[in-house]
Amino acid sequence: MLKILGKASSINVRKVLWTCHELGLDFEREDFGAGFQPTETPQFKALNPNAMVPVLLDGDFVLWESNVICRYLVAKEGRSDLLSTDPQNRALTEQWMDWQAGELNNSWRYAFPALARNSPQHTDQTLIDAGVSDWNRHVQMIEEQLQRSGDYMLGNNFTLADVPIGLAVNRWLMTPMSRPALPAVAAYYERLNQREGFRLFGRNGIA
C-alpha cells in the first residue's frame, strides 16, 4: 500500500491526498511536519534531503515534490483523462502545475504567513501590501485563463492541473485580505466543490 508522509493540513500533502482520492487509491498517511514528527532528522532526510513533506513511499520507491508525486500516480494508473499522453496537452497541464509551484506560490510567500498565521517574522506592512497586490495579480491570471478555457483550467474537463490550482484558490479565498471580485474564479471554486475529493482535501477550512 502507498504511504504518504506528511501532516494533513499541509497544502502540498493535500495535493497528493486529493489526487489519490480521484484515482481511488488506498493509502496510509503518517504525520510529519510542524507539530508532529520532525523532518529535520537523518532518517527523514535520507528520504527527502529537503526535509519537507510530502514524501511518497511506493514499496521501495521513494519520491518527493508534491506535483511530481501527483503526476507519477496519475501516470502509473494510466489516467490520460487527468494527464494526457499527447505531448502538447500534457505540457499544458504541467505548465500550470509548475506555474503554481513556482510563480503563484512565491507570490504569497510573505503575505500568507503574515495574514493567515500572524507570523512575528512577517510584520512589515509595506511587504504585506506588496505581497497582497502580487498575489491578486497572479490569481487574476487564473481568472483570465478560466475565461478562455471554460469550466476548468484546460477546458471543460477536470485535469490534474486543477488540483494545485484549486488548492491555491482555496488558500487565496481563505486568507483575510482585500481581493478583487473574480467571477470566473468564484464559479470555478464552486464547481470544484462538487467533487468529493475537493470537499475532503480542498475546501475543508484549512488554508
Image (cartoon, rainbow, N blue to C red):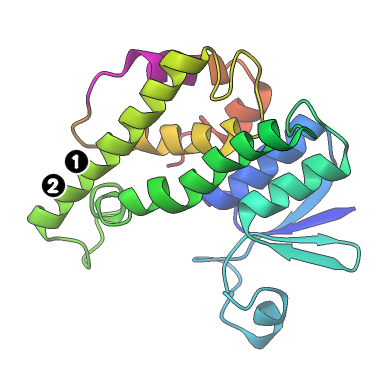
Could you tell me residue 128's position as x and y percent? 16, 51
Q: Is residue 5 magenta?
A: no
Question: How far is mark 2 from mark 1, CA to CA?
Answer: 6 Å
In this orientation, which residue lies closer to the viewer: 104 or 173?
104
**Label 1: few (<14), some (14–19) or many (≥20) C-alpha neighbours in 10 Å:** some
Q: Is residue 186 magenta?
A: yes
Instruction: Report the residue at 62% width, 35% height from top.
Output: 93
**Compared with residue 48, is residue 132 higher up or lower down, i.e. above or below?**
above
Q: Are marks 2 and 1 in contact (CB under 8 Å)?
A: yes
Predominant SS along the magenta part: helix
Residue 9 visible to the viewer: no
| Residue 182 quadrant | top left
Could you tell me residue 189's position as x and y percent? 47, 21
Type of the residue with mark 1: Ser
| Residue 157 quadrant | top right
Q: What's the magenta region?
A: 180-190
On the picture, is 17 further left or further right than 96?
A: right
Q: Which residue is mark 2?
A: 129
Q: Number of callouts in the render?
A: 2
Disc number at residue 133? 1
In this orientation, which residue lies closer to the viewer: 157 or 7?
157
Type of the residue with mark 2: Asp
Residue 14 visible to the viewer: yes
Could you tell me residue 154's position as x and y percent? 58, 23
Secondary structure, mark 2, is: helix
Q: Quadrant of the C terminus?
A: top left
Could you tell me residue 175's position as x and y percent? 31, 39
**Label 2: few (<14), some (14–19) or many (≥20) C-alpha neighbours in 10 Å:** some
Instruction: Report the residue at 60% width, 62% height from top.
Output: 53
